[in-house]
Image (tube, rainbow, N blue to C red):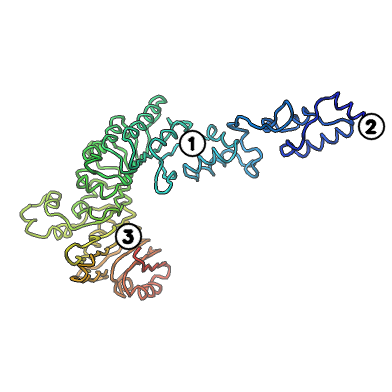
Amino acid sequence: TTKKRKASSSSTGRTADLSAVLPWIPRAQLEALISSSVNDHSAITTEQVINAMPDHEKWRIDPSDGKKKKSYTPVKSGPERVNTGAFDAVDSTTMLNILMFLNCKEKYTCVMSVCKGWREFKATMPSLFLDLSDNSWTARGRSLKADQLLVLMDWVPNLAQVTALRISTQDKCNPATCKQIVKKLVAAKKKAKAPMITKLVLHGPKIYGSLIPELTKNEVGKNLTSLTFHDVKATQQTKLGGAIGDFFKSLPLLEELYMPQSLASELGNIHPKVLSPLKAARAGASTLLRVLDLGDRSSLFNKIGLEDLSTLGTSAPELEVLRLGSVQRPNARRAASLLLGDLSDLLMGDPAERILSSPMKSLPRLKEFSVGRLVDSYAYGGAPRYATTEDVNRLLNWFLAGMPAVESFSFTHGESFMSKKDEKKYSYPSLPGIAPYYGGEDLMWPHTLKHLSLESFSLEANTFTENTELPSLKTMTLKRCGGNVDTIISGLRRTHPMVEVTKIESRW
């Protein structure tokens, strides 16, 4: 019998080394091969082994000897979701919805690194890579470099359909690279006759003035609805001054503006340098801004005066979110120019009194408002100057009168610090309070208020338990608000049992 088998095998073909290929042969196919071999009294040949393997696994075997290839050219893709476990049963639409929850870097990793079958997603799901604006590529505090973004733009399956972009720079970024990014994007858009991006993020200290005219010249902003300046500085080196104002004049559809308050202050006042150019883009009509976020607290020496906020409702009546880093008392000359009052009269009086005596221009759609601080971070050569409880009450009433529908209100007085030398000479003043009735004026919280956050105050025990109606309030956060916070919380549990109150003592 042994001789017959040897003769039979030599006549039917070469024998295969099954140990190298067993992992890739389905069990049913393997059992069929063995049964056939026993019934026919013949050895299993290389051809039979290769034919028993699934088509998408045959690339692993060298057909000349039936062994696993020692070296091979990697396959760029494979059948979509085959042998991927539970993902095999997921249809493409559901799979796309799942992947859309990931950030850009995670999507790229899934497509390129999970399995060869998933590489097909790049072609079959091009909408995965339409938003290149997130900061998911950050590693150790550094974002995707501008030259790396150029490589990513070459890899993206359909650059012409990209809707959002982030241009990130670092300390050693070449400004010409940023301009090249804009040119590559514009060329792809024009070739496909596709609309321009709707979201742009400019990130880093090397966003130079030379990049902004490139954006303006190529009309990158004509469809922009969201613009973010992150960690961008206006210095003698970057030369951003007038360039940003000209760019704003090309943004007729802008709805969201995220900008460090330090940058807005370095450019000038927000009315002539930010809001006026945006109005010019709309032929003098009011802007479409829904979000104005100047709440970056990285630089606390650049403050916005009340005079800039008093007429904000005229330029941006659609505002729903307003975040400010810090607010200061008004400058007399600025207040006079905005209020169109007599300059000599105003200089002789208190400009803050003039502004606070007139209601803030209403922002009827505003839902979220926050102020990062009222006082300087540091006091040099003297004791810190804090607001009084009466000042705080008047300021709060002035703000709230212009926000009849606000739902989230965050307000921080702030605390100043002195050097060790000054601490020996001066003492820290007491923090102001917030009283329901103080100085002849009731503090009127809007009935729409749902979330209230206060920081760096010295609150009295009856602050929210007397003459206070908060029917819609859901959450309250009290951070460093004095020794009566526990009493306030107990009182709120009696008068507003549905409110969740958070107490924070830490400064950070």
Query: Where is residue 41 shown, x and y percent of the image?
Result: 89, 31
How far apart are the alpha carbons under marks 1 and 2?
64 Å
How far apart are the alpha carbons under marks 3 and 2?
92 Å
Say which residue label 2 marks.
1
Which numbered marker is on residue 402? Answer: none
1 or 2: mark nearer the eye: 2
> Is 75 displayed left or right of 206 in the figure?
right
Q: The residue tagged with tag 2: helix, strand or loop?
A: loop
The three-letter amino acid code for the residue at tag 3 is Ser
Query: Where is residue 90 shown, x and y percent of the image?
Result: 61, 42
Mark 3 or mark 2, earlier in chain: 2
The three-letter amino acid code for the residue at tag 2 is Thr
Tell me, yes or no, if residue 55 can be seen here.
Answer: yes
Number of residue marks: 3
The three-letter amino acid code for the residue at tag 1 is Ser
Q: 99 or 16, which is in the foreground?
A: 16
Say which residue label 1 marks.
127
Q: Residues within 10 Å of mark 3 (few under 14, many from 20)?
A: some
Say which residue label 3 marks.
410
